[in-house]
Image (tube, helix red, strand yellow):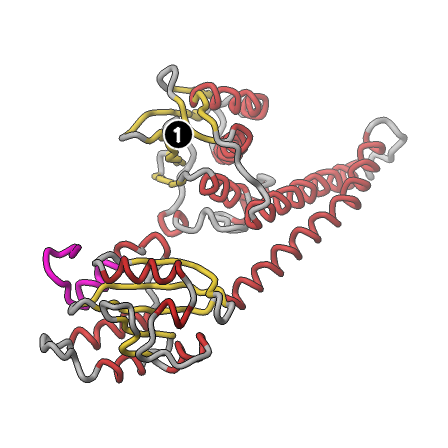
Amino acid sequence: MAIFGREPTLDEALSVLRRRLDEKGPLPKSLVDLGQRLALRESPRPGGDPSLPEMVAAMPDAAAVIDGAGRFIAANRPLEMLLGAKVLGRGLLEATRSHELADAAWRALAGWPASREMTLPGPNKVVGALLAPLSQARALLVLRDLTEQKRRELVRRDFIANASHELRTPVSAISGAVETLLSGLPLAEEARPFVEMIARHAERLGNLSSDLLDLSRLESGEFRPEMEPLDATLAMSVALELVRAKAAEKKLELRVEGPPGLRVLADARALEQIFVNLLDNAIKYTPALGRITMVAEARGGKVVLSVTDTGPGIEPRHQQRLFERFYRADPGRSRAAGGTGLGLAIVKHLAQLQGGEVFVESSPAGSRFWLRFTQG
């Protein structure tokens, strides 16, 4: 099956691969450079381009070209070092013992770019694999060793989880002592502002450790969503009631709009936390007497759930990074509002674990955070 109605050139194949993998970030520059060099030299002759091995050898990443029978016809030294063996002339499955990689390679040979993250049984390494179909029934394979990166991520997650857990005990003790001081014990008037400051920061530390633990559980795969059809409008209304008192302090108007009976496939607890986090953000940044609107609607077999505010908006340069942990579009204002900088990162992970996506749109008239889920 050829996606171009004919065998694609290398330049066309890389172009398609770039589009297909856009959601995973840009292609490695080395892969793009190789594609440009090969595209210039690609030959229509049956024997192929005699410079192909030299082009692949110039790649800094582990790279190879596979023929229609699944055999390596060109491979560079980084790839052979990664696999721990000579591979030229050998079959992909024989050299890697990875059925997952072999399946991705056959898809590429059939005309479909592929991107996978997998563990290779032979060298026992975690790799990111990119495959692009080439002309003359060949495929380009690029492997990137992710083993050390994954190990560091695991160490980081464990450290964050352990540190957050250890913080909870002293923070709880400080909060309890401060509450006791403020609840009626004799306290010098000049000391009260300092005790109240301790209380505020102890609360922030408690929220931060709680959010860090939540994020660590999500990233480690410890959380398993229990998917079920839920009434979208009802789920929004329940979340809205949880923040109504906070919104009332700023006299904000709260609204829920959506057709009755619209069902979304989601985990009830996870969906509630998503809504509460988004509403909490909207309340923080919407001026007094503003409006926050939640909308549920069906679009093309999906359910779109949105939270829209009438706040000052978010500059375009910040929007792509809002869902990164600890990223703040306005650090000073965010800290003054008491945020931990983790709420939107938690929203993103919860949405993805339920097979959903989250997006943001913003202008000076306000911001709209919206999610797309499967209809229940």
SS category of the residue bearing label 1: strand
Tell me the amino acid under the disc marked 1: Leu
Left or right: residue 353 compared with residue 7: right
Q: Position of residue 139 (x, y in %)?
A: 25, 67
Magenta highlight on residue 14: yes
Q: Position of residue 221 (x, y in %)?
A: 56, 47
Q: Quadrant of the C terminus?
A: top left
Q: Residue at x 77, y 41 (%)?
A: 194
For the residue pair 300 and 207, the one nearer the viewer reads as 300
**Image: magenta residue range:** 1-18
Left or right: residue 220 compared with residue 9: right
Q: Position of residue 122 (x, y in %)?
A: 48, 70
Magenta highlight on residue 13: yes
Q: Position of residue 355 (x, y in %)?
A: 42, 39
- Could you tell me how many numbered marks the image carries? 1
Q: Is residue 284 visible?
A: no
Q: Which residue matches tag 1?
A: 305
Q: Compared with residue 267, is residue 233 higher up or lower down, i.e. above or below? A: above
Q: Residue at x 17, y 55 (%)?
A: 1
Q: Is residue 26 visible?
A: yes
Left or right: residue 289 compared with residue 137: right
**Label 1 crowding class (10 Å Cα cut-off): few <14, some 14-19, many 20+?**
many
